[in-house]
Amino acid sequence: MATLIDMRRRIRSVKGTQQITRAMKMVAAARLRRSQERIFNARPYARQLMNLLQSLAARTEWRGHPLLATRPVEKILVVLVTADRGLCGAFNTNLIRAAETYRAEHAGQEISFVLVGRKGYEHYRQRSVKIAGKHVNIFFRLEFSAAETIAREIIESYSGCTVDAVDVIYNEFKSVLSQRVRVERYLPIPPLEPTAEETLVDYIYEQPPHRLLQTLLPHYVEIEVYRALLESQAAELAAKMTAMDTATNNAADMIETLTLTMNRIRQAAITREIIEVVSGAAAL
Amino acid sequence: MADALPNSIELVVVTPDRLVVEAAVSAVTIPGASGYLGVLPGHAPLLTELDIGRVTYTRANGEHAIAVARGFAEVLPGRVVILADTAERAEEIDAERAERARQRAEEELRKMTQAGESMDQAREALRRAISRLETAHHKTS
């Protein structure tokens, strides 16, 4: 049977854990706010770029660009965006499960991975999958340059015909309470719907349109990758916040039960002592 | 002429990180890859790459400047959209930091010239720093 001292020690340890989980929750909440702000700030640019591409699509014959060319899909590059760190509930597990489902669904094709985030890399490095690239520890200080590097890598693989399609698997930030795993095709770039707006006849191109596309399309891929990274970061922090909140509550429940047991043990000891005193007195 | 020309145009400057400026202006100059170009309300639609340089625009309360580097600019009827890789308003520029960057870039360039290496990157850094300094200076002039 546990002694009083044992119980006190256990309660103290659970309290310590609770303090840590509470602090982690606070940190996640603060960082989540900043991360959400960044998603919000990145939106105008993405929207304007999209408008620009759409208005360009309305006017130019641009199907010939290598990033738009579709070919029979035999080899796929999958960019799996996981987190660098754990303690965020089912965040990484869900992603890896989605990746496994994806592999099962595309059993006929050859799949290679670009692993973003340490958790995905740790999971796959021991397994028999082809790893084309890894980017770990980028989320603590997430910069646009990280997205540029990844985008350049996938564009190179695609335009060099090493792969026939590039898909990205990442967690989308829906709200603080829910994240959703998304699988999106990044390359070839899905055809853009030209806007029904007025087609302008006297449009001036300072540079030839094909040259503009040459820089615009890779840029578009960079922005999309950046968006996926931001979404994933916010989703990770939200998941962490929820997980740490649950942990803090569980710790509180545990402390309550332990305190109750401890009080029972103490009471039992006191009762026993009284009985000893009383029976000792009776024996006199 | 059917319509009188409007007397203001909407200017939007965005970078991947943020919205820098959104305002109604009466004139804009843009550092296009093939040279600076001035845009007044009623300009014909246009698309250009951006160089490193200074975007200036005129509002009711005076002239303002933004240091931009690389990206695109699109002129639409009634709207100028500037998608820059980086953009800083004149009042945001840390002149001291830009000055240090300029010295660093010059130093790099000197070293590379001696070593005979490619110096595109250092030259680009130098141009950015100079552009920032000029833009920062612009505000006080």
Image: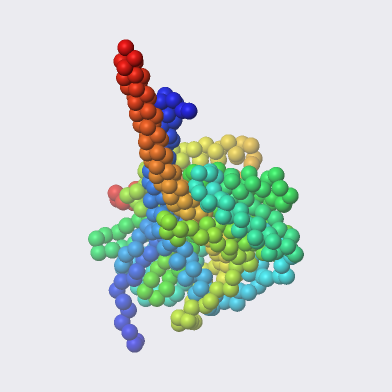
Q: How is the image coloured?
A: rainbow
A279, B19: nearer the viewer: A279
Identity of the residue furthest to the top in this view: A284
- Residue at image coords 53%, 44%: A86
From the viewer's perspective, is B129 left or right of B120? left
Identity of the residue furthest to the left in this view: B61
A162, A8: nearer the viewer: A8
**Residue A273 location (% of width, % of height):** 35, 21
**Residue A63 location (% of width, % of height):** 63, 74
A93, B45: nearer the viewer: A93
**Residue B123 visible:** no
**Residue B74 location (% of width, % of height):** 45, 68
A257, A62: nearer the viewer: A257
**Residue A105 visible:** yes
Name the image quarter holding the C terminus of chain A: top left
- Residue at image coords 46%, 58%: A178
Is residue A115 shown above or below A197? above
From the viewer's perspective, is A187 left or right of B126? right
